[in-house]
Image (cartoon, grey):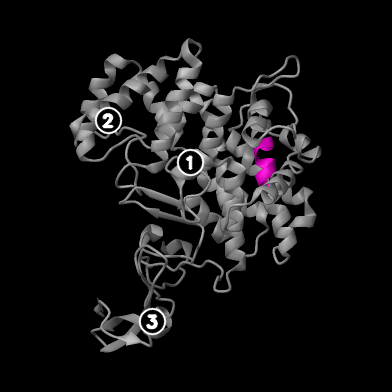
Amino acid sequence: MSIAETRVPTKKIGNKDTVTFTDNASGKSVDFPVMDGTVGPRVVDIRKLYGEMDMFTYDPGYTSTGSCESKITYIDGDKGELLYRGYPIEQLAEKSDFLEVAYLLLKGELPDAAEKAKFVKDITNHTMVHEQLASFLRGFRRDAHPMAIMCGLVGALSAFYHDSTDINDPRQRMIASYRMIAKMPTMAAMAYKYSTGQPLVYPMNKLGYAENFLRMTFSVPCEEYDINPVMATAMDKIFILHADHEQNASTSTVRLAGSSGANPFACIAAGIASLWGPAHGGANEAVLKMLNEIGTKERIPEFIARAKDKNDNFRLSGFGHRVYKNFDPRATVLRATCHEVLEQLGDARDEPLLELAMELEHIALNDQYFIDRKLYPNVDFYSGIILKAMGFPTSMFTVLFAIARTVGWVAQWNEMIEDPDQKIGRPRQLYTGVMRRDYPASKKR
């Protein structure tokens, strides 16, 4: 059996450090360059590993593998830091709005007043969808999950907008990007309205992005809809906080689909399918399911004890984060927003689960067990409570995530298309199946 070892850089090629990979069986050694990003861990460039050593790396989940070079988002889990194009998420959530953040992610810099006005106008002019898409919508069962509907509607956009599917044309890529950012709230509201049996509501271009979505979702033709500014601000912040998150599962899916040359609408539909998973976009829905399981404030001590019991499989959803080893910076922003929303609703909320959630938050923030393990409430905990308070059913939670993340997906997809080093995604495998064998006749099996 061949034994290989890797040594920390011992020499340089030009001005670059290298890592030496040695196969002890053959005695062959190869130097691989070490790459430095703007910030973050150094990266070993192993693109020539197979050609030079006839070996692959084994990395389930790609947790130690950099699949691309990107300038969009950076996460430091130990520091609890999230940057969009270098800007801290806390500053953007406090001072910016979603469409300005969308411009930043797409273009790389914050817009000036004229650039922002034009961008908002361009997005707003694309908010309507082709009327025949409503006929497509009605093909779904009434009880279809909204995410199933979104997968179908977004994938179907390529059948309606042939003038923006050429990925080699920068202008068509831009038009497709704008269309998806603009139409996603419209289609999400359509999915919600269809499930309730209410008539579809067209967008209104004089409204802001979050305001327009709330109106399309909750208004009915028979009466005026008054937009609550606290709710609209909360919705806008949720969109900002979920707009991008580095190379997560759904973003990697968009990039992988796009690497084959698939049209942008198909790529975003693939991202929605990946986001649907409970380990990814369904986390805030899991929070509400957990609260329903707990049921009453009197049962909280029982479930806290179960969470601390190593022999119990129960886990508190919405606490801690696999990336952030400290406090989730998005949760810091959304905690204040959550309390603002609940205070605004006052007695109108009349929802025992929300009171239960606040009591659970208080215990977790003060219990030494959670403090020592840094199991703070995360962004999914607070977003789930806010969306529940606003009146969204849990089935819509991941759809709202998809609205926000579309901006990040589009930005990442465009960056991938323009990257000269990008190749079609083709992960390798460690094969552990049977060796080659001959086909036996049925009577010999």
Reading the image, the residue beneath label 1 is: 281
Reading the image, the residue beneath label 3 is: 54
Rendering quarter of residue 63? bottom left
| Circle nearer the N terminus (1, 3) | 3
Reading the image, the residue beneath label 2 is: 365
Looking at the rendering, the stretch of residues picked out in magenta corresponds to 180-187
The residue type indicated by label 3 comes to: Asp
In the rendering, at what x and y percent does residue 76 appear? Answer: 36, 54
Rendering quarter of residue 267? bottom right
Answer with left or right where residue 257 lies relative to residue 328.
Answer: right
The residue type indicated by label 1 comes to: Gly
- What whole-number distance in Å separates the C-alpha atoms at marks 2 and 3? 51 Å
User: Of helix, strand and loop, which one carries label 2?
Assistant: helix
Q: For marks 2 and 1, give the one nearer the viewer.
A: 2
Q: Residue furthest front?
A: 113
- What whole-number distance in Å separates the C-alpha atoms at marks 2 and 1? 24 Å
What is the magenta segment's predominant secondary structure? helix
User: Of helix, strand and loop, which one carries label 3?
Assistant: loop
